[in-house]
Image (cartoon, rainbow, N blue to C red):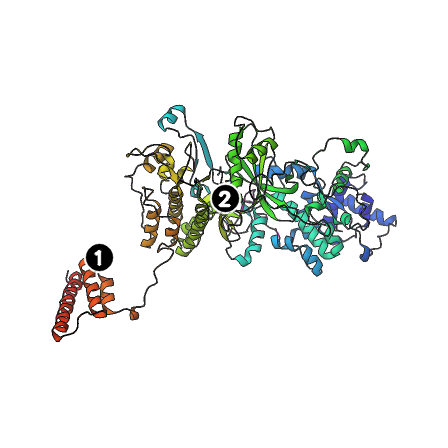
Amino acid sequence: MDSREEDNLPADHNHDSNLYRSFNASTSSSSSSFNSSPPDFLRNVQAAFKRHRMMPRMNLNNFQPRRLVAHRQETSNSSSPILDSKTDESHHVSAKPLAKNMMTLTTYNHESASVTPPSISGTPTEEGKFKSIDAQRCQPSINCDCKNRNSFDLPCLQCKQVVPVDAPKKVQFALENDARSHMGSLALTEMECDTNNQLNAPAVLNHDPNLQNVHNLDSDLTSRPNDERNFLQSDFGHHMTSSSNLGSTCCATTLVNSVHAPMVNSTTHSCPENKCELPRNQQGKETGSSSSSMLKDPPPVSDKSTKGDPLSVDAIDLKNDVKSASLKSGKQEKPASKKDSSAPRKRNYDPDLFFKVNGKLYQRLGKIGSGGSSEVHKVISQDCTIYALKKIKLKGRDYATAYGFCQEIEYLNKLKGKDHIIQLIDYEVTDKALLKEVMSGCMSNKDGRVKEDGCIYMVLEYGEIDLAHMLSHKWRELDTSSSTIDENWLRFYWQQILLAVKTIHEERIVHSDLKPANFLLVRGSLKLIDFGIAKAILSDTTNIQRDSQVGTLSYMSPEAFMCNETDANGNTIKCGRPSDIWSLGCILYQMVYGKTPFADYTTFWAKFKVITDPNHEIHYQPPPPNPWLLDLIKKCLAWDRKQRWTIPQLLQHPFLVPPIPVPVSDRNLIQLVSDSCREDRNAMLMCSRLQELVTDPIGLGSVDEKCKLLDEMSRLCIQLKELLGKPESN
Ligand SMILES: Nc1ncnc2c1ncn2[C@@H]1O[C@H](COP(=O)(O)OP(=O)(O)OP(=O)(O)O)[C@@H](O)[C@H]1O
């Protein structure tokens, strides 16, 4: 914007530093004579007043938002740590845009508000407009400069700031040739080090669904890298504050704006004459490969009307994008010539800042993690919802492999609407030829290679924390307090885990990679992720077909290790639902003991040896105080897969559904005697006979018969008395 307008800013001494930041920033992108140092700035302000530049008359009824251009970094709390994109990988993604981008602000001067909770104190209309933002993030102020603050996801327990976490690491390895032959078809496996050994950071958990928004916010704010905080603080903090101060007119214009970001600008859209010449809807034009029809049950595409919905994807205003960009470079905006319009379409967004999936833009907030083949980013959509965006790069892969990756989409589509499964919001396969192959349902071109920039994008529900981190936190707590595991905590999450796996097993899907890191906490519930190696059970079998062994070593079942080999009876060893149950047993063991059952066997071969040995005895030391818990783990970790319990059985196990104890007063003498001699089979038989005689005496016609029964009862009573008295006499 023209920097002269800046002169109109009210000279509020309380905001000197903010003013300075704004001016300083604005001068960097304009030809203003303002100098960058505070004394110079003050001199300039004084000079401006001397030149009798009047403050513009503010017509609040017809308030036109003005833009200040400020370095995004500078708009955040000045005490925030300076971003170092070189040293921190997770900052890297957004650091670049930060360095080169400016953001537009449509308020006088509210930098200070960017570090305080945005106040939504406006009219009901405003509140309505900001409902989604409000629900997502009523942000608390970040004032702490905890030295621990880093790029990672978990807040420091003391100050709730972010502290570094070593995410669960995976070691992916391929066996050497000789090892391969040794192992049959064992191909690529992944070993996950025990997370309890690796995780240092505590997590603040809030399982109260009522507080979930606050929790989201907490985790969102504290877990995001600095650049992301800057983005949100500057964008949302400012905008929401400004909107609450300036009224609904401004409210609509003060959303996620950055110079390189396509802007959501309702000023354009509210143009009564509808003179806006630039395209409203860019959806699908960029890649042109909407995959909505790719698989059954395509993801819903938002059908928001442009009118009156400044947040809608349709409301992207490229004009502002271009305009801001030209302002940044100090050049005058030129009208697009005919020649320009015939030029090949260029990307209308900054790929360093945004992902585009089916025409919808998602701004990167930071990298969450990466798997063997993918990277997952935390993103924010244009309706201000936080999602996880999984990007699988298909570059150089053959079609058969790429097809396999597409299957994850297929499973997630199948599991849409299921409570305990992470929800797929949208997806896109950019390689049209691959898409065509997938759509046709058969791989005619198995050897075909995916296009250079071929990618799969999946927009997923965002999970705040995974079970691995939760466990690590729990165990850290236990270690310091010397208390034992809380059984109710265990029951709650164990039941959720079972419900998630029940869902997929009912859909005839075997996950094959169940581990704590694949259960994410979403609004207080655990949800299952990562169907990368999941397999559907074909209709006429109970097992899945696999060419190679897959899974995460510490959680792999014996049959997963020996898949396709033959057992002692000459039968081919296959994997099915029981294989997942074994993995669940390992998870439960880890929940109880803080480590996986085979954690002490550190090398691959040691693990392989013990897990595939039917005579190997798993240690349960010390046995849990509740014998039902021990029984439950054993029911999952039975070496023979036929002995393992199924999910419906596990859901009814006495650990989860404890038998309701009958009050002593309601029980008769015989029952009490029977309770106290459970171990003695004879005693139990005598008790049940006695019970029979008392409750259902048969053939009591004559006195003789009555005497006979009484005799029998007395004999049984004497014998029982002797049995009961035995231990005492010993
Ligand atoms: N919906 C989500 N919300 C938050 N984080 C997620 C989400 N999906 C995945 N992640 C995180 O991203 C990382 C990698 O995800 P995912 O496991 O899906 O990828 P992958 O390539 O299949 O990984 P791997 O091969 O290691 O299992 C993990 O740290 C996971 O916790």
Q: Are marks 1 and 2 in contact (CB under 8 Å)?
A: no
Q: Is residue 67 visible?
A: yes
Q: Quadrant of residue 656?
A: bottom left
Cβ at disc 2 under 8 Å from ligand 1 = yes
- Kindly state the secondary structure of the residue where label 1 is placed: loop
Q: Position of residue 621 (x, y in %)?
A: 31, 47
Can residue 590 be found in the magenta stretch? Answer: no
Name the residue nearer the viewer: 363 or 154: 363
Residue drawn 68% across the image and 57% down it: 128
Name the residue type under label 2. Answer: Ile
Identify residue for label 1. 679
Q: Is residue 36 visible?
A: no
Query: Residue farthest to the bottom?
Result: 703
Q: Residues within 10 Å of mark 1 (few under 14, many from 20)?
A: few
Left or right placement of residue 396 versus residue 655 in this view: right
Q: Position of residue 391 (x, y in %)?
A: 57, 37
Q: Main secondary structure of the magenta part?
A: loop
Vertical relation: 558 (above or below) 232:
above
Disc assigned to residue 529: 2
Image: magenta residue range? 141-158
Q: Position of residue 676 (x, y in %)?
A: 23, 62
Vertical relation: 97 (above or below) 204:
above
Q: Position of residue 547 (x, y in %)?
A: 42, 31
Q: CA distance from mark 1 to mark 2?
A: 45 Å
Query: Residue farthest to the right?
Result: 52
For the C terminus, the quadrant is: bottom left
Residue drawn 46% across the image and 36% down it: 170
